[in-house]
Image: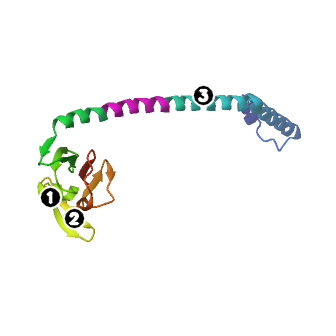
Amino acid sequence: MLSRNIQTIQNPQNNSRERRLFEEIRTKEQTMKRTLFKLPKKCSKKMSSFILCMVLIVAIALCTSGCNDHAKNQTSVTSNPQTDTQADTTILGEGSTHFLFSVVDREGNETIFEIHTDKANVGEALTELELIAGDEGPYGLFVKTVNGITADYETDGVYWAFYIDGDYATSSVDTTPITEGQTYSFRVE
C-alpha cells in the first residue's frame, strides 16, 4: 500500500514538499518492516535453542532404537548358522588329536570338517588328507588349492587366507601346531 503511494509521486526532485513526503513515507515503511518481521532477540534465541534441543533428542532416540534393532537382528543371524553348520560337519582322518577346519569360498559358502590326526601341525594334517595343496615359498607353504578350489593371486587376484579362531594367522599353515579346541580356516580374499 505504501509502495503504491510512493510510486504515485512522479518526480520527488521537482518539489521539496513532495521530496520530504517521499522520504517520510520511505522511513515509515522501513520502520514497519523492521517491526513486523523481526522478533525480539531474546525470543529468537530461546526459540532456536529449544528447536535445536528437540532435534538432538529426536536424533539420539532414533539412533539408539536403530542400534538395538540391529543388535537383535545380528544376534539372531549369528546364532542360526552355528546350529546349521554343526549338522553339516564332515569327519575326516584317524588319530587321537582332532580340530575343526572350515573352508569359505569366493561366494561365502562354508564347508566344515572335523579333522582327526596324529600329525603335529595343521599343514601336515590337511596335506595328508589332500585338503590343501600349494607351492613351497620362503615363508612356508603358499596354499593355492583348498578342498579342490583353486585361488591363485597371480591369475585371479585372490588368495587363500589362513585364520585361527577367526583371527588372521601370523604363521603359515605348515608351521602352526595343532591345538585341540581351536578352529582353523581358509578363506578366499
Q: Earlier in the sequence, mark 3 or mark 1?
A: 3
Question: Quick check: 62 above or below 139?
Answer: above
Residue receiving disc 3: 54
At 19% from the left and 44% from the top, the residue drawn is 112
Decide which of 100, 41 is in the foreground and name it.
100
- Magenta includes 76? yes
Q: What separation in Å lies between label 2 and label 3 (alpha carbons)?
A: 61 Å
Q: Are marks 2 and 1 in contact (CB under 8 Å)?
A: yes
Q: Amino acid at mark 3?
A: Met
Instruction: Please give the label number shown on residue 57.
Output: none
Q: Earlier in the sequence, mark 2 or mark 3?
A: 3
Q: What separation in Å lies between label 2 and label 1 (alpha carbons)?
A: 10 Å
Decide which of 161, 120 is in the foreground and name it.
120
* Position of residue 173 measured from the top left corner of the image (x, y, whole percent): 24, 59
Q: Quadrant of residue 8?
A: top right
Whether residue 65 is visible to the viewer of this picture, yes or no, is: yes
* Position of residue 100 measured from the top left corner of the image (x, y, whole percent): 22, 45
Q: Are marks 2 and 3 in contact (CB under 8 Å)?
A: no
Residue receiving disc 1: 127
Q: Amino acid at mark 1?
A: Thr
* Position of residue 179 measured from the top left corner of the image (x, y, whole percent): 27, 50
Q: Amino acid at mark 2?
A: Leu
Question: Quick check: 15 above or below 127?
Answer: above
Question: Quick check: 3 above or below 114?
Answer: above
Q: What's the magenta region?
A: 63-77
At 83% from the left and 43% from the top, the residue drawn is 14
Q: Residues within 10 Å of mark 1 (few under 14, many from 20)?
A: some
